Image (spheres, rainbow, N blue to C red):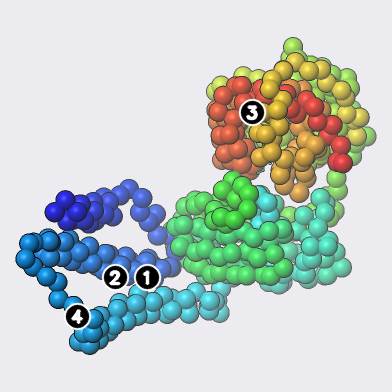
Amino acid sequence: MLLAVALVLLVLASLAFHFLSPWYFTPLASNWGLIDLTVNVTFIVTGLVFVVANLFMAWCVVRYRHRAGHRADYDPENTKLETWLTVGTSIGVAVMLAPGLVVWGQFVNVPEEAAEFEAVGQQWHWSYRFPGEDGEFGNVDIRHTSPENPFGMDPDDPVGRDDILISSPIVHLPVDQPMQAWLRSKDVLHNFAVPQFRVKMDLVPGHVTYAWFTPTVVGEYEILCEELCGFAHHTMRGRVVVDERADFEAWLDSHPTYAETMERGQGDAALGQASYAYCSACHGRDGQGILSLDAPAIAGMDVEYTARQLRYYRDGVRGTHPEDAVGANMRPVMAVIPDDESILNVSAYIATMPAQTVEETIFGDVERGERIYGSCAACHGANGEGIWAVNAPALAGQNDWYLAAQLRNFRDGVRGAHPGDLYGDQMMLMADILPTDDHVDDVVAYLNTLSGGTN
Ligand SMILES: [Cu+2]
């Protein structure tokens, strides 16, 4: 009797959860309403079977409970019942699968009028490419990939010269325009998914896959990497902004073509040296950092990373959180190097400065720190040397008090939460494994032991 009551309660609770749960579809923002239909059909068919089977079981438990003097019938063959069950099950399965096959047919057949773009996945970052004026993509090959050529563009292919390269994880798309997304991975399996579009497709290294959709609602949506296998894919977030056509075109025009990125160069260290005189007041003549001013070591820092941080300070992405009094120090500095070119020049100079030895000020449980750092090494390198391919800076050789302050900042959302902070989510999500200041000190104490060398 108790079992029967439990079964009925199970059914009621499941139904209540299904209808009252706050975890439901996000509002639809693409043409793929049919995907919702197939999911709903599956819910209805499996839901009916679930309710009927459990209530039937509850009824049997009561109706055929043990009673003295009663014996069960033995009925191993019942053709009528078996036919009935087989036909019923087949219809149920067919109803569930048939709409899916029809929708899949549409999902893999891209309409003629679709425009194209490419989404490139890498650990743990999205970037995008548009075909440019000729409407055709240039050749790419992983063998051409380098810090100067992150898309792996073939330098000898004239078709690729006008390709437009978007190295940020934020992409804009025009509303009501069917889009074919070509999906390319630079390293491991990834998965491109925009919940509001109901679109989801794997990126497979060595292949180019695709998905298509028509964004129907202007707005901003998150791109998720829904790859389960592997490390840190949940930190791989991008954003798609659906614009009116004119806004989209203005956005696209503001990005460089491949030919333009080649001409831009890597900054002039000699010119940058002149502006460094100003920086030395806080960061030290040799870029070793000065504790009393909270200014970190910067000598030898990677050009791309330095330039990105300087643009962040300039654009208010970093150093503007109300609790970031220390970061605010860098905001007025940017008046001295306001444009991208002078930022690149001073960054190029900083990269040429020999790394300095820094003093230890934080002592913690180095062994525990080493265990924690196991989760960081995939991005920052086993020796804390930094890995340009995943945009993670060197940590070894940095002042420990500065590292600890930054980790607390990421943990508390003081750094990284600004929507323009391209990799902030990654570090905010990673800082979850450093819940207390002791964890922070331990991992920083371990970083003090690392050489930073690449071997
Ligand atoms: Cu991924």
Q: For the residue marked with disc 4, what is the amino acid?
A: Asp
First in sequence: mark 4 or mark 3? 4
Q: Is residue 352 above or below residue 330?
A: below
Residue 40, quarter of picture: bottom left
Specify the label residue 38 is tagged with.
Answer: 1
> Dividing the image into 4 quarters, which one contains the C terminus?
top right
> Dividing the image into 4 quarters, which one contains the N terminus?
bottom left
Q: Residue furthest right?
A: 270
First in sequence: mark 1 or mark 2? 1
Please report the residue visible at 57 percent of the width from the left and 39 percent of the height from the top: 429
Please report the residue visible at 56 percent of the width from the left and 21 percent of the height from the top: 323
Q: Nearer the viewer, residue 359 or 420?
A: 359
Residues at marks 1 and 3, CA–CA distance in whole angstroms: 44 Å
Q: Nearer the viewer, residue 91 or 220?
A: 91
First in sequence: mark 4 or mark 1? 1
- Of helix, strand and loop, which one carries label 2? helix
In front: label 4 or label 3: 4
Q: For the residue marked with disc 2, what is the amino acid?
A: Val
Report crowding for label 3: few under 14, some 14 to 19, many 20 or more residues within 10 A (C-alpha): many
Please report the residue visible at 12 percent of the width from the left and 61 percent of the height from the top: 66
Mark 1 touches mark 3? (CB < 8 Å): no
Residues at marks 4 and 3, CA–CA distance in whole angstroms: 69 Å
Q: Which residue is mark 3?
A: 407
Please report the residue visible at 71 percent of the width from the left and 44 percent of the height from the top: 378
Can residue 419 be seen in the rendering of this structure? Answer: yes
Q: Residue furthest front?
A: 69
Residue 246, quarter of picture: bottom right
Q: Which residue is mark 2?
A: 45
Mark 4 touches mark 3? (CB < 8 Å): no
